[in-house]
Image (tube, rainbow, N blue to C red):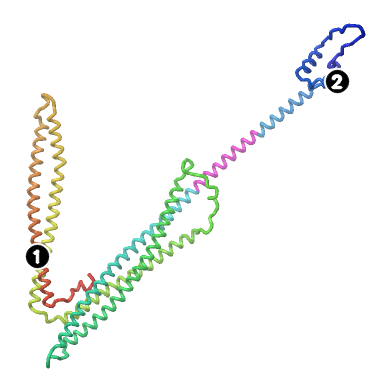
Amino acid sequence: MTSQSLVSRASFRDGSVAQPELLTPQTQESKIIDKFYPSAGFSTSGYRCTKYSPEEWTENNDALLLQAANDRDEAQKVRHESKETQMETESVTLRRQADGTRHLGHRLQDIHFWKSELQQHIDQTAAATGSLVALKRRLEKALDASETPFRIAADNLAWRERRLGPDLVKDNVDEELLKEVELIRNVQSLLRRTLTQTIDQIRANREAKKTLELDWSDKRQAYSTDDQCGRYTNGSQDTQQHLSSAKLQLHVSDRVTWARFTQDNLAQAQRELRASAELQLLCERVLQETAEDLQAQCAAVDAAFAHRCQEVSEAKVAMELHLTQILEQIGAQERNIAMLQQALRDKEAPQRVTQTRLHQRAQRPNVELCQDEPQLSLVAEAGEIECAVESLQRRLAESQRSLRHLEDTRMALEKATATKTHSLLVDRDRYPTASTLAGY
């Protein structure tokens, strides 16, 4: 610091008047500093100054520039590394997302395959159960039907015990009747056992079907969930943050146990299907053989039917044949009536079109209301449609009249057939038919 920064003092003498202070440029600067910065007066009163030297100013600028350059380089490095990190993470994220979508697609294929297998076995199990239910009804009907020949045989034995004198003999008829009673008891026992097996198998099939349906329902829900997940994209609006979802869940199945679970269910269903098929064959054989045995024994016992029963039976068969033909004609006539009614309905649309065209053309102004070729064609078309409708209505009336006659004849034949059936029952022909004994 130089001496020019010092402030000159005023001199005071005795008896003299104070002279005005001469201000140098440095003094004026100190006055200004003291005015606006009073605390700076102490620093300006000695040899110390608040200003930096040129060397310090240069060093400060160099340091600032160096810091700026370093910060600029560091910022460029951070931006470059950030860009690389962003590109790398974007690539990894997209690749991972594509892998996840692909894995979801493979998973959907697996679920669809097993779901299809389950659906196929569910349908097969349902069909097998339906067949067994039908066989169960046949077994029940056959068991009920076996009571009738048993009562007939027992009544015959009881009536033959009323014979008097030498006629009370143990002949071939008694032997055949005793054989029939024993056969019917054995048949009924066999039918009951088979019916119990059928009921148990139906219950097992339904349990297996229920298990398959539960598995199928779970896979359907899982398929829907994975399908929805596979449709999510980065632009989806219904995605949310679930921070805890990235953790592996406990007590979940793996791919092996997942597939084995369904395979075990399918294997159980296949076992039930095989058992159902075997039981179905057994039921069919039991029903057929028992019906044949009962019919054969019935033929041995029923050799003495009266001639009247034969005549009534022949008349009944003839009426049933005519009744079948009448029913066929009734069905054909009903279809014919439906066809005629549909034809009449089909004529309504073209008739409306023709009449609408004629009505609209009748609104033509002045000389435009002309009987031109379209007008003549439309009038002819309307007449043809009316003729066709009248013809169809006549045919419909004839068909309805014919149907009424057929219905009257059908009722007469049914009444006559019922009368012949009652006559056969009165004539002691109470033995069930082969189809009834077979459970139909």
Q: Position of residue 25 (x, y in %)?
A: 80, 12
Three-letter amino acid code at the position of disc 1: Leu
- Residue 137 visible from this viewpoint: yes
Q: Do the residues labelled 1 and 2 touch (CB within 8 Å)?
A: no
Residue displayed at 53% across by 55% down = 249
The CA distance from mark 1 to mark 2 is 148 Å
Give the residue at mark 2: 46
Q: Could you tell me which quadrant the C terminus lies in? A: bottom left
Label 2: which secondary element: loop
Give the residue at mark 1: 413
- Answer whether residue 83 is magenta in the image: yes
Q: Where is residue 139 in the image (x, y as percent from the top left)?
A: 27, 72
Left or right, 434 with reference to 235: left
Choose between 274 and 354: the one closer to the eye. 354
Label 1: which secondary element: helix
- Residue 53 visible from this viewpoint: no
- The overriding secondary structure of the stretch rendered in magenta is helix
Three-letter amino acid code at the position of disc 2: Gly
Residue displayed at 35% across by 71% down = 200
